[in-house]
Image: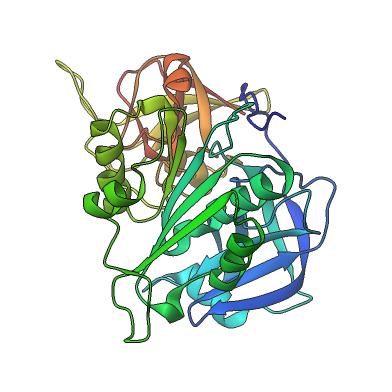
Amino acid sequence: MKFNIDLPFKKKKKNLTLTLNEVKRETEKAVTLIFDDDEACKYLPGQYLTLIMKIDGKEERRSYSICSTPKTENGISVTVKEITGGKVSGFINRNVAKGQTIEILAPEGNFLLPDDHQGHLVFIAAGSGITPVFSMIKEVLHHLENDVTLIYGNRNESSVIFGSELRQLAEKFADRFTLIETLSQPSENWNGLKGRINHELLKNNLQRLNNDAFYYLCGPEELMKTTKEFLLKSGVTDKKIKQEKFVTSKKEPEMNGEEQIIERQVTVIVDGEEHQVIVKPDETILEAALDDDIDMPFSCQSGICTTCRGKLISGKVSMEEDEGLSPEEIENGYVLNCVGHPMTDDVKIEIG
């Protein structure tokens, strides 16, 4: 059974509107939004939805990983954890209700199960990083035959998302699914592992795995950095490690020789129509285009989700962050407009 999809130059998709069938409280600071079925909203385990919310009269877009599985559950669900100062996550946790309609962008994302892989699948997650992992694990257990290991870290018992569901799966699929939970600040009644996911914990719990395993990482940046470092030192090849980032640290755009970030004109092609945009030094290509009321696709605006991806036809663009793109996409000339700055005067980008 194949899961990975080819990622050709993406055509722009129309926005969809879904109705909330249920709002399920997972923890004190996390809710799952369960939407109705929609034929136009097909997805793969591990992908995400972008919600378009109107808050205080302004349109806000945020991407949230899908936690449901397409062949096992009706509808499509995302889990939203409220973060400190989070305008959208806070609004969703306190205000959305059953029966409400929410505008979305069609599912996207490259955090997918491997093609025809018969070996072990290892998932390492912390906090809300469990969301896409939960979707993938359910898909594998219900529809494939792979052995699965999940190492799942949280702060305390009350912060664990999907805890009871995961334990039920571990009991039902005891011959194939190993669940390893660890808490950094547990109560006295906690009988599981204690502490954060670190090299020692990984070494103690991944010794029996062979080189045939695939590894999926999702959670805080430090967790994924630590885990990937451990895996690479243990002989796991980079191509067998996949990561899903929710946030990223932007870097300074790369400049060579006389290249400078200065005001430049950029040509963007949207739906076959060319637009000339003046991009100032303190803004990205996406920001300049949106200021000119050009209907550009976007979501996270931090270089992670790739919704804003475009094909560079000519010129040079420097990006503050490119980890959302695969090496093949970068080689084929794709750029992320939300973190992109024109470095030459002949930049032309075709938007999907």
Does 236 sit left or right of 3 as displayed? Answer: left
Q: Residue at x 62, y 54 (%)?
A: 66
Does 19 sit left or right of 176 as displayed? Answer: right
Q: How is the structure coloured here?
A: rainbow
- Between 227 and 262, the residue placed more toward the observer is 227
- Between 246 and 152, the residue placed more toward the observer is 152
Above or below, comparing residue 93 to residue 301 in the picture: below
- Between 166 and 51, the residue placed more toward the observer is 166
Q: Quadrant of the C terminus?
A: top right
Q: How many marks?
A: 0
* Residue 210, x across and y down, in percent: 41, 32
Q: Residue at x 26, y 52 (%)?
A: 222
* Residue 211, x across and y down, in percent: 40, 28
Give the residue furthest to the bottom.
Answer: 188
Above or below, comparing residue 169 to residue 291 in the picture: below
Q: Residue at x 61, y 25 (%)?
A: 7
Q: Quadrant of residue 343 in the image?
A: top left
Q: Quadrant of the N terminus?
A: top right
- Between 291 and 153, the residue placed more toward the observer is 153
Judge whether residue 58 can be spotted in this image: no
* Residue 146, x across and y down, in percent: 61, 39
* Residue 193, x across and y down, in percent: 33, 67
Q: Quadrant of residue 208 in the image?
A: top left
Give the residue furthest to the left.
Answer: 257
Q: Residue at x 72, y 49 (%)?
A: 142
Q: Quadrant of residue 75 in the image?
A: bottom right
Does 259 sit left or right of 284 as displayed? Answer: left
